[in-house]
Image: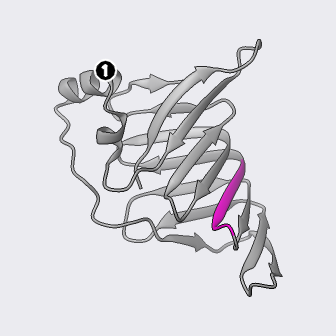
Amino acid sequence: MSVLVAGHVAGPAPTRRARVRVMRGMTLAAALGGACLSSAARVAGAQVQAPVQRCVLEFEGGATRSNAVRLPSNNYNFFQGGGVTYRCKGQDVTLIADSAEYYGDANVLVLITNVHYREPRVRVDSRRMTYWRMEERLLAEGDVYAQLPSGTTMR
């Protein structure tokens, strides 16, 4: 899973919103591309490599409270609270949040409150993230903060 971050100020208050988009066949460094990452990569001597596989999300068990609702399509909607952690199988990519909702028919995972996306090339924090599994697209909203290993930050 890779991430593209493009931020803008939303509304009259100093709240910030950024779109984080997962793009097939691209690493974070390749997706960010722009001047910010290009400069940071040159300074850090970073090299960009394409991932070898799609993200297959795996839920890590624990003290999480879950409720499953079976749909007429035989898919399930899941509602989880008490802290959730998801990882991409075989990749160093982690999603952590206070709560989550998964909508089986739409293949959409919504992570709610204190959301953290982690991979070797970036750390992204926000109040909410939505992950569209079929498109491998991730959207971060609400007080979005991203940090590259070089120390470069985006808000």
Q: At which x and y percent is residue 107? A: 63, 68
- What segment carries the magenta color? 106-112
Q: Is residue 8 above or below residue 51?
A: above
How packed is label 1: few (under 14 Cα within 10 Å), some, or many (20 or more)? few
Toward which corner of the image does residue 105 lie, by quadrant?
bottom right
Pick the front one: 119 or 53: 53
Q: Position of residue 21 (x, y in %)?
A: 49, 45
Name the image colouring.
Answer: one colour
Q: Give the residue type that dot 1 points to.
A: Ala
Residue corresponding to mark 1: 35
**In the displayed structure, does residue 114 sit left or right of residue 93?**
right
Q: Is 55 colored magenta in this rendering?
A: no
| Residue 52, placed above or below residue 7 | below
- Horizontally, residue 6 falls left or right of residue 59, namely left
Position of residue 58 measured from the top left corner of the image (x, y, whole percent) = 54, 72
Seen in the picture, residue 8 relative to 123 is either above or below; the reply is above
Magenta highlight: main SS? strand
**In percent of the image, x 38 and y 26: which residue is there?**
151
Give the quarter of the figure containing the C terminus.
top right
Q: Among all residues in the image, which is located at the extreme front?
A: 73
Expressed as whole percent of the image width and height from the top left, the position of residue 104 reads 69, 73
Q: Residue at x 44, y 65 (%)?
A: 55
Residue at the image position 56 percent from the left and 36 percent from the top: 19
Classify mark 1: helix, strand or loop. Answer: helix
Q: Is residue 43 rendered to the left or right of residue 101?
A: left
Q: In which quadrant of the rendered view does residue 85 lie?
A: bottom right
Image quarter where the N terminus lies is: bottom left
85 lies above or below 72: above
